[in-house]
Image (tube, grey):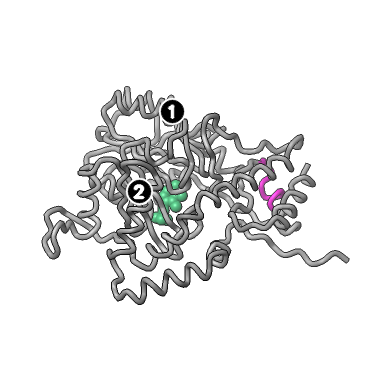
Amino acid sequence: MNAPLTMIAQADPGAGYRALKPEIDAAVARALNSGWYILGQEGAAFEREYGAWLGEGMQAVGCANGTDAIALILRGMGIGEGATVVTVSHTAVATVAAIEMVGATPLLLDIDPDTYTMDADELAAVLEDPPPGIPPIRAVVAVHIYGQACDLGPMLAACEKAGVPLIEDCAQCHGATLGGQMLGTIGHASAFSLYPTKNLGALGDGGVLATRDIELAGRIAAIRQYGWKERYVSSLIGINSRLDEVQAAILRTKLPHLDAGNARRRAIADAYDAALAGGRFTPPLRRANATHVFHQYVLRSDDRAGVMARLKAEGVGTGIHYPVPVHEQSAYAGRTALGPAGCAETSAAAKVVFSLPMYPELSDAQVEQICGALSRLG
Ligand SMILES: *Cc1c(COP(=O)(O)O)cnc(C)c1O
């Protein structure tokens, strides 16, 4: 008889905690013992360290979650009611929710099926000739899905020509690069989720946004706390979206391990690519001149349920990111504007994509077990 299979989870944020437990426990104790729990030294230090990690001149502002990070950037730019914000339907619903939170109208474009990122040609066409019946386009939110860059060059050129800012949704791409530049430093501002399963994850909710624009960063820092520039006096219309000290202390502990974690994800992706070589599955396309950080390793199959069941029988957990495109979800269907070409590639992808286990703490033995199962899929 074979040894019983232990199931390998598709995501395992607890493994990220266990890997650094003594350091994280000490950081939590430090934050708790400080007696200061919201917007104190840990948060300020995390903002400094995250900005420095992103690169020269980057100002980082912590907030409550990645959705708020996008909404705060839009608010900081004065974008709300009476504005259209362009993004994609193939994303976490959070991207679209953030646009509606500030009162703006989302316009959802289709994706390039090879990279699952926004169709750059469609963006250029829509900026040049906006669809009728929607408010003027005031911003673009580019989603670097699964840990890989959008085709940012032409997208930025189209945005500059149209005079609208490009905001990067970096919730899945901490540490990824394009043309040697860190994602999150290329557009006008960028939003990062620090949800526990992200490449840099808190042990609770968290978010951080970044920009080179010092004035914008200052405005957003005020907006995230009731619009205060001085205590108890609101000079701007604000909200409450703060990163707490315990999460900031945990994030400061994890940040120095992020680059190594991303390298481990790439090594695991290389092993999956090799196990699939010559078979019927096409490994994820890696954009040339870019570093993919594999937030997800995504395959496609017309027999998705069957393949997922076979992998499960071999102890390999899988997930689907995402099973229903935003524009087909009942909260959005029938009332959300799409680009003139519709979202056919988005709808097609949602029916076939599935994600393999992917996190730095996967052991070599687990990776071997997964690769064995992949090679037996043929
Ligand atoms: C996770 C995620 C978000 C939202 O982040 P939260 O921290 O959950 O609010 C936004 N966009 C994308 C692409 C995401 O993956």
Quadrant of the snapshot with the C terminus: top right
Q: Main secondary structure of the magenta part?
A: helix
Residue 120's disc is 1
Is the residue 31 above or below the residue 13 in the image? Answer: below
Figure quadrant of the N terminus: bottom right
Please give left or right for residue 285 compared with residue 314 in the image. Answer: left
Q: Position of residue 144 (x, y in %)?
A: 46, 40
Q: In the image, which residues are magenta? A: 301-308
- In the depicted view, which residue is nearer to us: 298 or 25? 25
- How many angstroms separate mark 1 from mark 2 (CA)? 28 Å
Q: Amino acid at mark 2?
A: Gly
Q: Is residue 5 left or right of residue 185?
A: right
For mark 1, give the secondary structure: helix
* Residue found at x 58% / y 50%: 320
Which of the pair 130/230 is nearer the observer? 230
Q: Nearer the viewer, residue 55 or 274?
A: 55
Which residue is found at the position 14% from the left and 64% from the top? 231
**Foreground residue, 59 or 113?**
59
Q: Position of residue 6 (x, y in %)?
A: 72, 65
Where does residue 336 sit, x and y in percent of width and height?
Answer: 37, 41
Q: Residue at x 24, y 53 (%)?
A: 221
Instruction: Give amino acid for label 1.
Output: Ala
Q: Which mark, residue 51?
A: 2
Residue at 57 percent across and 46 percent down: it is: 263
**Mark 2 packing: few (<14 Cα in 10 Å), some, or many (20+)?**
many
